[in-house]
Amino acid sequence: MDLVFSNCTVLTNDRENVVLTECDVRVNDGVITELGRSNSRNQPQRLVDARDLLIMPGLINSHTHSPENFSKGRAESMTLGPWLDQIWPALDVLEPRQIYIAALLGAAEMLHTGTISVVDHFRQTPMNLAAVHAVAEGYRDSGMRAVIAVMLRDIPQFKGQLLPSVTDQIGIVEQAHLNCDTLKCSKVRIALGPSAPTRCTEKLLISARDLALRHGLYLHTHIDETTTDAAEARKQYGKSSVQHLANLDLLTPFLSLAHGVWLNSEDFELLAAAGSTVVHNPVSNMRLGSGIAPLTALLEHGVSVALGSDGAASNDGQDMFEALKAAVLLQRVAGVEAKHWITAKEALPL
Ligand SMILES: [Zn+2]
């Protein structure tokens, strides 16, 4: 299909933040082939008068959990600990068909609100290959780009919880990665998703690191979402979660870490030097009362930052424009001096 949007405003979101006005955008079979005042004599198959419309790159949601698309609005007044206990028992044991539908539901909301790429920190307990296939097929059929970070943990959430062995969990991720071609999931990538450093033994973290290196896979984890998480790391290792990951050679540009609400300035230095990315989830952090992530300080220290919605059960939606607005405004009630406030223009590239 040859399609032209005429007379629109284009937000390029490039390094110089160039904005083009009264611009024509020609799209041929899904690829932008012309940008600017159209000199082409070729009449498009379809012409859209986009005079009052804005065209911009699609947004990226760098942290969510698709099974939660079934649980919007639940456990509304709970902090993370009780919220996890309330929300996840029912979502941990979905059938593959339900997992597929949950991924499609979230994808539909994201595409409707301008998000075209997602990192799904995908949880089922116990993790199994059929579940990973089902979520991959959901994103495949939605047309979205997706990184499915298969959630791993070998320290139980509660007494008696049965978890697959480290070898089995790593084997599921490797097999899912190898099966992506067979499933025709060309826009889907499989990644390793340790739930959080404090929920994984060193053996699991090191095994995940080694598999990532062997196949060139991304790693994604939660980090210091609550004061309890940060204190637990200090108790377990005598150091911060980030320092623990650094000691295990896990801090690389291929690692992203969701939340980071309770990081300290030493963590900032380590993350900036390693090129790892912190994913800020402002709406979820407010919903669960987890705190305000030090977004401005992270950026000032040169840490790479991305934005996420987090799962729908701690956000009640998957709209990344909401996350953008909340990220900009939340810093302003966190004691940051006005001269350091980030603007919408600065937040958009996140
Ligand atoms: Zn999360």
Image (cartoon, rainbow, N blue to C red):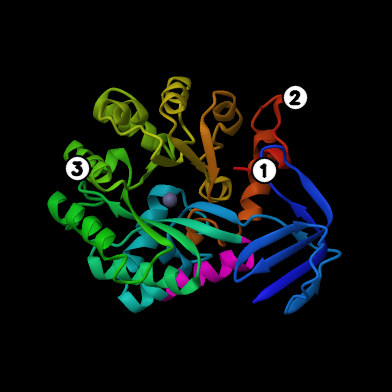
- Give the spatial CA distance, label 2 vs label 3: 45 Å
Residue 214 or 164: which is nearer the viewer?
A: 214
Q: Which residues are magenta?
A: 101-114
Whether disc 2's CB lies below 8 Å from ligand 1 is answered no
Label 2 Cα crowd, 10 Å radius (few <14 / some 14-19 / many 20+): few
Q: Is residue 333 above or below residue 87?
A: above
Relative image position of residue 79 (x, y in whole percent): 46, 48
Q: Residue at x 39, y 74 (%)?
A: 100
> Residue type at mark 2?
Lys
Q: Secondary structure at mark 3?
A: helix
- Give the spatial CA distance, label 3 vs label 1: 37 Å
Viewport quadrant of the C terminus = top right
Which of disc 3 and disc 2 is earlier in sequence?
3
Label 3 Cα crowd, 10 Å radius (few <14 / some 14-19 / many 20+): some
Position of residue 149 in the picture relative to residue 297 (left or right): left
Relative image position of residue 285 (x, y in whole percent): 53, 45
Whether disc 1's CB lies below 8 Å from ligand 1 is answered no
Q: Secondary structure at mark 1?
A: loop
> Is 106 contained in the magenta span?
yes
| Quarter of the image where one finds residue 15 | top right
- Residue matched to label 2: 339
Task: Tell me, for residue 207, which label it has, or none.
Answer: 3
- Give the spatial CA distance, label 2 vs label 1: 24 Å
- Residue matched to label 1: 14
Q: Is residue 100 above or below residue 31?
A: below
